[in-house]
Amino acid sequence: MTSTRPSSETADASGPARPAGTGRAVAVLVLVALGALVPLLGPSAALHGTGEAAAPGVGGVGLLRTVLFAALCVPLGELFVNRLARGVPGASAERPRSWAAFAAGAGFVAALGLASVVATGNLVPSGWAQIDVGGLYASRDGKLALLEVNAFAVAWLCALSRRPGGQVWPLAAVVVAEALRAHPVTEHDPLTGSALTLVHLFCASLWVGGLAHALRLVRLWGVREAGAALLGLYARVAALLLAAVTATGVCSTLRRMPAETVLEQLTTTAYGRTLLAKVLLVAAVAALALWARVRLRRAADPLTACVPARGEVALLGVVVAVSGLLTALPVPIRW
């Protein structure tokens, strides 16, 4: 079977040809810029009227965590979907250019920034003299921060090597470190909380990064049957990932906000308000995913499912930004 690939250039009668990817690149840059505004401007809106005080530099920390989460999604999604693509009959062996090395580099910078915050006692450093690098080895949070920095460095090397599949191990180390960081030993039953966060973060990374890479593969192949088969395979696994993300998210919420206080804290605390925004966004994402699945099964051209799927990717990017903000806000007090 021969594949028909879309042309890299388009022309019209009114002017010279323009690169077909220019519009998409601009759209991506705009979405990234808007996504960065969520953790930067979100804290003031979330904290307004709650009487809570945020830690210094909460917006910057939220932005760094957003970058870190996105840096997990991209390579894990590529590895996941590339594995699915091997089982698609008639699919081309061609793959789009990997973004894993760029993601690992961004993750390294974000992890380094977060480590500098930990090194100054969870304060934003105003100069190099305030950063106590040696002090990182003396605390649990410091060791986890160093682990994330080193893990992204190793992931970057793996992404550039002849065996990029080796990235899965350092990336898994980052997921474990994030799960442990989110639940300090002073918390009630911290291992249970860490286990829930580990599953939640891992499944969410596969879901977000996997869909973005699947759409890139479908566009590159340009073959309707192979593209539809890949999207169908992804959709079946994504349904399980969504179920896991939802279940672990609900359990984690009830651990931090008991059932009898959830409704009140969703509107009276910064954490609750941000969590409510995230829930509404995920509900919208689920609706788009359902729409895409219906088109994939019933439309004359199953690849029209890419339209709602692209909207799903954009909203998932916002969900990642809101998640980054959520980790930087004060955890609500258990009443």
Image (tube, rainbow, N blue to C red):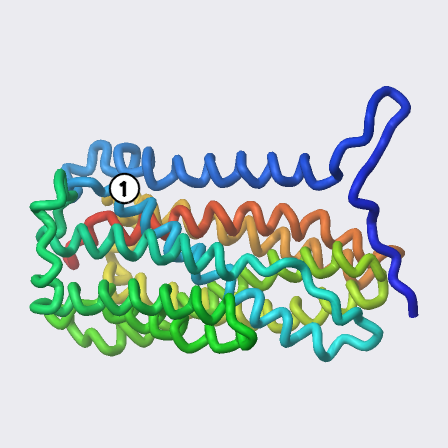
Q: Residues within 10 Å of mark 1 (few under 14, many from 20)?
A: some
Q: How many numbered dots are placed on residues in this image?
A: 1
Q: Residue at x 74, y 66 (%)?
A: 94
Tell me if residue 106 can be seen: yes
Give the left or right position of residue 55, taking residue 289 as reference: left
> Residue 204, position in %: x, y?
47, 64
Residue furthest to the top? 14
The residue under label 1 is 60
Where in the figure is residue 66, as x and y percent of width and height?
38, 50
- Left or right, 320 with respect to 218, comes to left
Front residue of 267 and 330? 330
Q: Amino acid at mark 1?
A: Gly
Quadrant the C terminus occupies: bottom left
When the figure is inspected, residue 224 is found, relative to residue 288, above or below; the finding is below
Residue shown at 75%/39% (left/top)?
20
152 with respect to 118 (left or right): right
Q: Is residue 135 above or below residue 313?
A: below
Q: Quadrant of the N terminus?
A: bottom right
Residue 201: image x %, image y %?
40, 66
Q: Looking at this view, is 210 or 154 the one in front?
A: 154
Quadrant of the rendered image containing residue 259: bottom left
Q: Secondary structure at mark 1?
A: helix
Front residue of 82/272: it is 82
Going 77% across and 56% down the picture, which residue do you hit? 295
The percent position of residue 215, horizontal first and vertical second, equals 68, 56
